[in-house]
Image (spheres, rainbow, N blue to C red):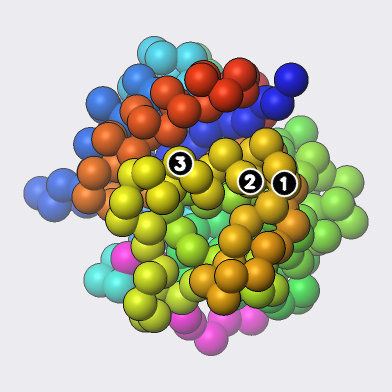
Amino acid sequence: MAVIDLNCDMGESFGAWRMGNDEAVLDHVTSANIACGFHGGDPRTMRRTVAMALARGVAVGAHPGLPDLQGFGRRNMSITPDEAYEMVVYQVGALAAFAQAQGGRLRFVKAHGALYNMAARDAALAGAIAAAVADYDRSLAFVGLAGSELIRAAEKRGLRALGEVFADRSYQDDGTLTPRSQPGAMIESVEDSVRQVLSMVLEGRVRAVSGREVPVQADTLCIHGDQPGALAFVQRIRQALAEAGVTVRAAAA
C-alpha cells in the first residue's frame, strides 16, 4: 500500500502582515514546516503555529531560510557553508525551543526557498545544512528535494533522509524545480496538481515541463501555504489520495 506524508510551509506571517490560511490547512496535512524568523515568521507566530500543529497531532518541523524578510527568502544570496551551518543551527534551535516549551518536540528540518534550491545543487551547502542538523540532534529527519544533493548529504551524515516532491510546482529534466522567475513554475490548476501528485506517489515519476518523465522518490509531498487557493489544493489532494488507496501519515512522527 502506498504511503505519503503531506507537508505544508507555514507560520510565515510577520508582525501585522498575514500570510496563508494556516489554521484551516493544518486540518488536512500531517507535517508542518514552520518558518523560524529569517525569511518569515516572528516569535509570536512561531509559538502560535507550533501550538496549532501540536493540538492537531501534526508533526512539527523547522523551516530555516536565508535572512531576507523583504524577499521572503526566495532571492539567492552568496553565503559560505559555514554561514549556512550557523543560520540553520540558530533557526532550528529557536523553533525546537517553542516546541519543547509547549510539551512537544521537533521532528524534522527542511530548508526554505532559495537556501533549499541552492543546496539542492551545491554539495558544500547541502553538507553544511546536514551537518547543522546532525550536530544539533541527529534523531531529526531531514527533508530535501528528491534525488538532490540535500538527500545525499543527509545520508552521508547518517540522518534519516526524506525525499520531497511538490504538488504545486513544475519540474525540469534534471529533477529540480522550475525557477519561479519562469512561466509555469507554479501549477495553478487543482486537477493538474492532482495528476502530478498521483504520478509521483503511485508511479514514482513526474512529467517535466519538456514532457520528459523524470523518476522521483516520494516520501513527503509539499503544498505551499502561501499560494492562493492552498486550502482548496490540499483538500482535493487528500480526497484524490484517499480514492487511490494511499495512506497519508507523518513520515517523521
- Please state which of residues 41 and 174 is positioned toward the viewer in this rendering: 174
Q: Position of residue 161 (x, y in %)?
A: 76, 45
For the residues labelled 3 and 1, say whether their Cβ atoms are less than 8 Å apart: no
- Residue 171: quadrant of the picture: bottom right
Name the secondary structure under disc 3. Answer: helix
Q: What residue appears at the point 55 percent right and 56 percent down from the top-left corner?
A: 111
Secondary-structure class at tag 2: helix
> What secondary structure predominates along the stretch shown in magenta?
loop
Left or right: residue 231 versus residue 141 is left
Circle 1 residues within 10 Å: few <14, some 14–19, many ≥20: some
Give neighbour class at mark 2: few <14, some 14-19, many 20+ (Cα, 10 Å).
many
Is 103 on the left or on the right of 249, as rendered? Answer: left
Give the class, few, some or many, for how many residues have Cα within 10 Å of label 3's Cα (few <14, many ≥20).
many
Residue picked out by circle 1: 204
**Measured Cα–Cα span from mark 3 to mark 1:** 14 Å
Mark 3 / mark 1, whichever is N-terminal:
3
The verdict on residue 205 being magenta is no
The magenta segment is 72-81
Distance from disc 3 to disc 2, alpha carbons, whole Å, reads 10 Å
Question: Which amino acid, mark 2?
Answer: Met
Discs 1, 2 touching: Cβ within 8 Å: yes
Residue 142 visible in this rendered orientation of the protein: no
| Callout 1 amino acid | Gly
Asked if residue 72 lies left or right of residue 54, the reply is left
Q: Nearer the viewer, residue 207 or 10?
A: 207
For image coordinates 37% across by 44% down, the residue present is: 191
Identify the residue position indicated by label 2 in the image: 200
Query: Where is 99 relative to 178, above or below?
Result: above
Q: x and y percent of residue 203 in the render? A: 71, 43
Residue sitting at x 30%, y 72%: 71
| Residue highlighted by disc 3 | 194
Type of amino acid under label 3: Val
